[in-house]
Amino acid sequence: MRLISIIALVLVIVVGWFVIVPMVAPDVTEKTVVRDAQVFLGDTCATANQSEFALTLYEGALSANATDPVILKKKGAMLIKCGRATEAETVYQQILSQDPNDVTALVKTGDSLASKG
């Protein structure tokens, strides 16, 4: 009886994941879950002053959507922390090419220019 219960539970989980979740949340895919996990871990690393590792995680998250402005801003901030202002400026220019009125990107572009001296 116990084995049947376990098999039934596994079946419910599998059916839920492959049938119910796509109907309820069609945008949730393995790719988006991995992207969100990378961003979360990147934020955690950034908080712990692990800027290079955070940058690596943000770059991985961008592989799912290279134009995501939120992740691009996080990447730009880490590039500035890592002393790579020229690269950060390029990232902020990429954001501004999508939205020329993005205030954060405008300010951070100025920060990246100022940090270059």
Image: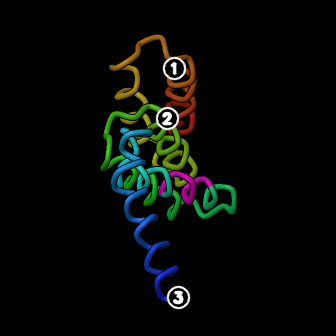
- Which of the two residues, 13 or 106, is positioned nearer the viewer here? 13
- Which of the two residues, 7 or 16, is positioned nearer the viewer here? 7
* Residue identified by numbered label 2: 70
- CB-based contact (under 8 Å), mark 1 and mark 2: no
For the record, the magenta segment spans 38-43
* Residue identified by numbered label 1: 106
Q: Quadrant of residue 97?
A: top left
Q: Taking 21 as reference, is 90 above or below it?
A: above
Q: Which mark is residue 1?
A: 3
User: Dot 3: what SS?
Assistant: loop
Q: Identify the residue at horizontal 52%, vertical 88% (top origin).
A: 1
Closer to viewer: mark 1 or mark 2: 2
Q: Main secondary structure of the magenta part?
A: helix
Residues at marks 3 and 2, CA–CA distance in whole angstroms? 50 Å
Q: Identify the residue at horizontal 53%, vertical 49% (top origin).
A: 78
Q: Identify the residue at horizontal 51%, vertical 51% (top origin).
A: 39
Of the two numbered discs 1 and 2 on the same chain, state the one appearing first in sequence: 2
Closer to viewer: mark 3 or mark 2: 3
- Counting from the top left corner in percent of width and height, residue 30 is at 35, 55
Q: Taking 29 as reference, is 86 above or below it?
A: above
Q: Identify the residue at horizontal 51%, vertical 34% (top origin).
A: 112
- Counting from the top left corner in percent of width and height, residue 71 is at 47, 41
- Counting from the top left corner in percent of width and height, residue 16 is at 43, 56
Residues at marks 3 and 1, CA–CA distance in whole angstroms? 64 Å
Q: Quadrant of residue 17?
A: bottom left
Of the two numbered discs 3 and 1 on the same chain, state the one appearing first in sequence: 3
- Which of the two residues, 38 or 19, is positioned nearer the viewer here? 19
Q: Are there few (<14), some (14-19), or many (20+) residues within 10 Å of tag 1? A: some
- Counting from the top left corner in percent of width and height, residue 82 is at 53, 55
